[in-house]
């Protein structure tokens, strides 16, 4: 087969010609998280030059703590985007679950661990609701989650009756993820550890299990997946349920982070998580990306946010920088997907 | 219309059990009759081409055999046992693999993953049963063996994404997947329709490799020269019925086209040609 290709005369020397740019494209095709890693490094260097208080060991700990909530949500969002879907209601599910945890413990006097479990189940059910509408009623994920964003936000406000569950009223176990851990000047919280653990577990599952492979296959080519005997609907519903569970864990992290359960916290998380995943090199068309990229993406989002405030700059630049990065990331994705070895 | 008898090369009576056969298959879609009592037989170790004009019912016939459609009536037997498929997965579990025209491989996934998609192997021991860990190196190794066995050893790296391959190589991956799991019958639905000349030649070579390994192959194709090149017998489908079964040696392409269009009619008793290999 290969000998049929060889045997050119004048063209022979040009056959294996590869421009540098082609080589870069091929490398990024294999390692999609590489470009966000470079962007993160540049971001850190720029703000470090702008302010000597930025990215000191203490400050890096603060960035890690600020990343915990959006970083956790981004794990679930990555799973969903890998199937070719999107979840606009992730932040709403997170806040709803956190309110359920706090209020069942405070108002109904349910023991902390049980309240936590109820909150996690609520997250799963919310995910199942989205998954059901997408696979059984066959509605586009964008529309379903736009609708459920409104539904869950409204349910949260109605259920909370506009009231915040304050620090002193919270069950002890619910505050557990706010506990600081000192690593010699570098101070993080247990919430950061939980986020990192979720990344490790999801990276393993996506890389080394059949379910992980099916998540990629369903997003990459639904017809090929179906013909290979994969039950697409079942995979998609399981992804939305797993994501709902992760969003509920993010709700737990959120309680630890703000030291309260408020129906108005975490408003930015819906879009920030999508931003983190997209900047992290996962394709919005599904089937491509690594969960580790979303962690880098989440770190970029918080670094920009935090860097601007440390450097005393206008926060409006955040929207500018992040907006620009999203467009660059999606353009890069389009380009990388055209790579041929 | 002339009524010609085409001399069969061998006697129609035989004692060989067909690997896959059907009797009187009927399939209708509303008032549209797709299959009007089709008899069909595939013998062990042969390449049987199924040809016919558009609407002759060859796709429907194949869909019934591969479990994608359920026939209204008629019987099917695999290796002598009566079978009834309600889903494609049942046909696959019975050992019938189908390669679809549309290059049904997931582009972003690598060769090994595509080969084992939906049938992944897990590691032995607790790593596999508790941690659900896949046998990555094992699958790559078996993928490689499979590709070598089919004479497509030019593909070295089983971690290569399928989208980086040419159309012919992608089809080769799909054929290799069918060959790896199809223990009884392999059905190829227009495998060269989307391919160029050289890539088509690769796929035809693969078909011959499959036959040499003893696997019977059903080939659906519009391309007469290709059919005449690889097929042992040719099943001609016309107006929802079997019009004839012939060999490439006994009949010219012109006559086959005449049978397909109805210009030439074959006597009832000469329609069922037995195995020639």
Image (cartoon, coloured by chain):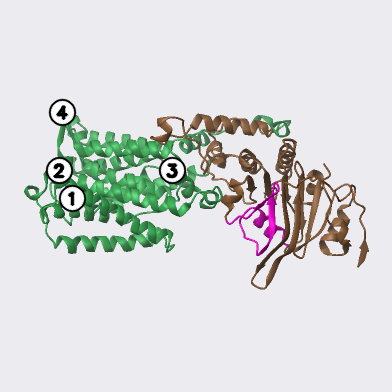
Question: Is tag 3's residue or tag 1's residue first in the polypeptide sequence?
Answer: 1
Mark 4 residue crowding within 10 angstroms, few (<14) / some (14–19) / many (20+): few
Question: Is tag 4's residue or tag 1's residue first in the polypeptide sequence?
Answer: 1
Identified at 43% across, 29% down, the residue is B125
The residue lying toward the viewer, choosing from B200 and B86, is B86
Question: Is tag 1's residue or tag 2's residue first in the polypeptide sequence?
Answer: 1
* Residues marked 3 and 2 touching at CB (< 8 Å): no
- How far apart marks 3 and 4 lie (CA) works out to 40 Å
Q: Which residue is mark 4?
A: A185
The residue lying toward the viewer, choosing from B186 and A33, is B186
Residue A165: % across, % down: 11, 53
Q: Which residue is mark 3?
A: A211
A53 lies above or below A152:
above
- How far apart marks 3 and 2 lie (CA) works out to 32 Å
The residue segment tinted magenta is B57-86
* Residues marked 1 and 2 touching at CB (< 8 Å): yes
Image quadrant occupied by the C terminus of chain A: top right
Q: Nearer the viewer, mark 3 or mark 4?
A: 3
Mark 3 residue crowding within 10 angstroms, few (<14) / some (14–19) / many (20+): some
The label on residue A173 is: 2
Q: Which chain is brown?
A: B
B65 lies above or below B44:
below
């Amino acid at each position: 087969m290969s000998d049929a290709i060889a045997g050119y005369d004048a063209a022979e020397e040009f056959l294996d010609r590869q421009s540098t740019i082609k080589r870069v494209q091929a490398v990024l095709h294999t390692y999609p998280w590489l470009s966000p890693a470079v962007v993160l490094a540049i971001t850190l260097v720029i703000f470090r030059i702008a302010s000597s208080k930025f990215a000191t060991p203490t400050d890096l700990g603060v960035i890690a703590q600020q990343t915990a909530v959006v970083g956790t949500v981004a794990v679930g969002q990555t799973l969903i985007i890998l199937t070719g879907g999107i979840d606009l209601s992730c932040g709403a599910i997170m806040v709803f679950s956190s309110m359920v945890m706090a209020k069942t413990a405070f108002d109904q006097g349910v023991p902390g661990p049980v309240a936590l479990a109820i909150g996690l189940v609520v997250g799963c059910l919310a995910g199942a609701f989205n998954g059901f509408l997408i696979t059984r009623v066959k509605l586009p994920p964008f529309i379903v989650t736009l609708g459920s964003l409104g539904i869950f936000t409204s349910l949260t406000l109605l259920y909370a009756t506009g009231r915040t569950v304050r620090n002193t009223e919270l069950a002890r176990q619910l505050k557990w993820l706010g506990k600081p851990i000192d690593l010699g000047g570098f101070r993080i919280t247990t919430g950061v550890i939980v986020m990192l653990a979720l990344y490790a577990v999801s990276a393993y599952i996506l890389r080394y299990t059949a379910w992980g492979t099916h998540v990629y296959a369903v997003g990459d080519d639904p017809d090929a997946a179906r013909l290979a005997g994969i039950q697409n609907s079942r995979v998609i519903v399981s992804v939305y349920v797993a994501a709902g569970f992760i969003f509920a864990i993010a709700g737990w992290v959120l309680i630890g982070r703000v030291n309260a359960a408020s129906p108005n916290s975490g408003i930015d998380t819906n879009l920030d998580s999508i931003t983190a995943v997209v900047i992290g090199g996962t394709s919005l068309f599904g089937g491509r990306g690594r969960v580790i990229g979303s962690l880098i993406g989440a770190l970029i989002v918080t670094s920009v946010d935090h860097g601007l405030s440390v450097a005393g700059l206008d926060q409006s630049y955040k929207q500018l920088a992040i907006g620009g990065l999203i467009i660059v990331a999606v353009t890069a994705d389009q380009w990388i997907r055209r790579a041929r070895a | 219309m002339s009524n010609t008898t085409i001399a069969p090369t061998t006697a129609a009576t035989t004692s060989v059990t067909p690997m896959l056969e059907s009797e009187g298959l009927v399939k209708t879609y509303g008032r549209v009759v797709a299959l009007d009592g089709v008899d069909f037989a595939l013998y062990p170790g042969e390449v049987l081409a199924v040809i016919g004009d558009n609407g002759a019912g060859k796709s429907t016939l194949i869909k019934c055999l591969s479990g994608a459609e359920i026939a209204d009536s008629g019987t099917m037997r695999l290796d002598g046992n009566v079978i009834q498929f309600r889903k494609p997965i049942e046909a696959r579990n019975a050992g019938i693999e189908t390669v679809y025209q549309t290059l049904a491989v997931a582009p972003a996934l690598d060769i090994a993953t595509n080969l084992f998609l939906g049938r992944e192997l897990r590691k032995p021991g607790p790593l596999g049963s508790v941690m659900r860990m896949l046998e990555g190196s094992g699958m790559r190794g078996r993928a490689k063996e499979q590709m070598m066995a089919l004479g497509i050893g030019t593909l070295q790296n089983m971690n290569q994404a399928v989208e980086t391959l040419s159309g012919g190589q992608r089809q080769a991956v799909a054929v290799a997947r069918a060959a790896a799991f199809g223990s009884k019958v392999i059905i190829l639905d227009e495998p060269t329709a989307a391919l160029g000349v050289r890539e088509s030649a690769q796929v035809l070579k693969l078909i011959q490799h499959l036959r040499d390994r003893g696997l019977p192959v059903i080939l659906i194709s519009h391309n007469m020269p290709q059919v005449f090149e690889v097929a042992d017998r040719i099943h001609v489908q016309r107006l929802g019925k079997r019009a004839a079964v012939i060999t490439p040696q006994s009949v010219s392409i012109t006559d086959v086209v005449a049978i397909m269009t109805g210009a030439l009619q074959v006597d009832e008793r000469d329609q069922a040609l037995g195995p020639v290999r």
